[in-house]
Image: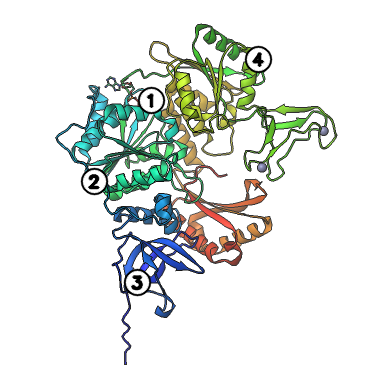
Amino acid sequence: MTELIDYPPIVKVALDVPLRRLFDYIVPTEGLAPQQGMRVRVPFGEQTKIGVIASCNQQSDVPIHKLKPLMTILDNKPCVSEAILRLCQWAADYYHAPLGTVLAGALPKRLRLGESLPDEMPLTMHDTSRSVLRVPGHDLNAEQKIAVDTIIASLGHFKAFALDGITGSGKTEVYLQAITRALAQGLQVLVLVPEIGLTPQMIARFTDRFAIPITLLHSRLTEKQRLAHWLLAASGAARIVIGTRSSVWAVMPHLGLIIVDEAHDSSYKQQDGVQYSARDVAVQRAYQANIPVVLGSATHSLETLYNVSENRFEALSLRERAGDARLGRFRVLDIRNERLEEGISTRLIKEIATRVEKGEQTLLFLNRRGFSPILICHHCGWVVPCPHCDSYMTLHLSPERLHCHHCNTVRKKPRQCLNCQSDVLMPVGLGTERIESVLNKAFPNTEIARIDKDTTRKKGSMEAYLQAIEDTRYLILVGTQMLAKGHHFPNVTLVGIIDADSGLFSSEFRATEHLAQLIVQVAGRAGRAEKAGEIWIQTRHPEHPLLDILLEKGYHAFAQYVLTERKQAQLPPYTYMAMIRIQGRKADVLQAVLTEAKQTVSPENLRAVRCLGPAPSPMEKRDKVYHYQLLLWSYQRSALHDALNQLTHFLSHNKSARTLRWSVDVDPYDTF
Ligand code: ADP
Ligand code: ZN
Ligand code: ZN
């Protein structure tokens, strides 16, 4: 006699828990019918959790008597659209993250916590009789016209474009006019920007141009605003959404075009949790939705340029000058035998002085905040270490303190060496605060602005600085790379790169790419046609081939050269890379777990995938915790993913690994 079991309906639910699987629940017979994308509250161990229905089934691998019923269905229509669910599923596979965690990152916090959707979604106000424009756009130059026409011609099917042009070459104008035409077809447009606080000029351009509201989605909104804006996007009412990284997941039913501005920017890569690249997710989203995506930059990442050379992306170039586009003149300043005033050569100080006299602005870059990275005893060489990290404490002057940038420990500056009791403790190395103090001494009557994480913590402070710079309230600006993003400084006629050597000689494989991007970005941000700027680069290696190619032949030639190096060194984009990072209180446990994990990768896989480690991370101890890693790379993406599947499977089920924090980083930005 065959037993016929009549299964009740079952849903597979994605929960934000470390396990990379879905959880089955029985649907109680009364009440609403479950649908994919609806949120549910379910029992989970001793707790209850909110998850998203990934699929509705009649079957389960788990015996029916072991399944629990779900508690409530929170939505009466899907909260996550089919398109976003599919995108999240792709990301969960690609980044080896639990689907529930990807989905949690895709939803506004209030929805994640169970707040109900409004009964009436905000409605689309589709008044097609009125123009979406407040003012007409510029007459496009030939290259801009080709760019806009090409983008518009591909509406309705997938195509990835790399729009390439220096600051002021007219990229934003191309976005604006492509968007105008997409809106005319009733489509929604998503514009990704690196950081909202850094892009007030760009948002102003949008609100000046369009007569329809611009919907912003970023982390500086309150949770209430965030939900309201998210709902506007999800209902289709928001026609233009401008947002940072996580808005790549926004539900947009009529999405027809995606733009990623400053596509090379590092803030598109999420560095914790699900370590996705919003740029890459945007391309995948466009592919799934069958729509065009435009990546815009003056300094595209080597991955993007490689994709162009492989004909996966189409290049759109703006080489003619639209507005006031021009690059300043580069000067390499050999500081080998120069007298340095605490890091700044007297030559550079003289140049700053001539600008100050003329009332022009100077911009100085140094990628290290604080006063100096170490405090050292002049007698015995003892350096003040961080008590919790394999690192040293950075000296800050205002307020005076020692600060560890890795774990945020703050200590009073010691009066004496703890090793030999000498009281001659000297700061060694440069930070933005130190450069500021040197300049204050050299230019006692000049206003100096320092712009780094320490001085821009407060909401709105960055905007205030930008305005003050535009009003020429400061003649000298000192900052970290924060200052290189997004803005245009028409009164700056001198840019100084204080320390190019730290970028030229880093162990990180992307360091030279990032240095070149910084140099070209700042060169494009300073000055204007009638007042072109000069960019002075301090180095002890003036003959370095990379500097030479960059400055003589430009970013593209530089990129080709570095791509050749990457190919020889078997580095991305020629190979695919991933990292497993693990942290815990006992180094030997980490080592043992990763060693065992590595042994679970099948031999045929190990032939195609190189696996380096386990090894301590470049900074082994951080905030009292040890960090270890495995570095994997392969010529075949599928082999890499197979290996990662085996590793994550082991780590999810291994007893000691389950008590540790570990993460997978596919396409890592750095190997730290
Ligand atoms: P990017 O985004 O590449 O920095 P923008 O689009 O902001 O360049 O253009 C730089 C400046 O030139 C802006 O002030 C813009 O209004 C102006 N501009 C852009 N395209 C044109 C054009 N075709 N004709 C006249 N001015 C233009
Ligand atoms: Zn000492
Ligand atoms: Zn520390």
| Left or right of residue 83, residue 555 in this image | right
Question: In the structure shown, which secondary structural element does the residue marked by tag 4 occupy?
Answer: helix
Tell me which numbered mark, 1 or 3, is placed earlier along the sequence: 3
Q: Amino acid at mark 2?
A: Leu
Q: Which residue is mark 3?
A: 27
Q: Which residue is mark 2?
A: 123
Q: Amino acid at mark 3?
A: Val
Q: Is mark 1 within 8 Å of ligand 1?
A: yes
In front: 509, or 90?
A: 90
Position of residue 615 measured from the top left corner of the image (x, y, whole percent): 62, 51
Disc 2 crowd, CA 10 A, few/some/many (<14, 14-19, 20+): few
Comparing marks 4 and 3, which lies closer to the viewer? 3
Q: Which residue is mark 4?
A: 441
Furthest residue to the front? 119
Tell me which numbered mark, 1 or 2, is placed earlier along the sequence: 2
Q: How many marks?
A: 4
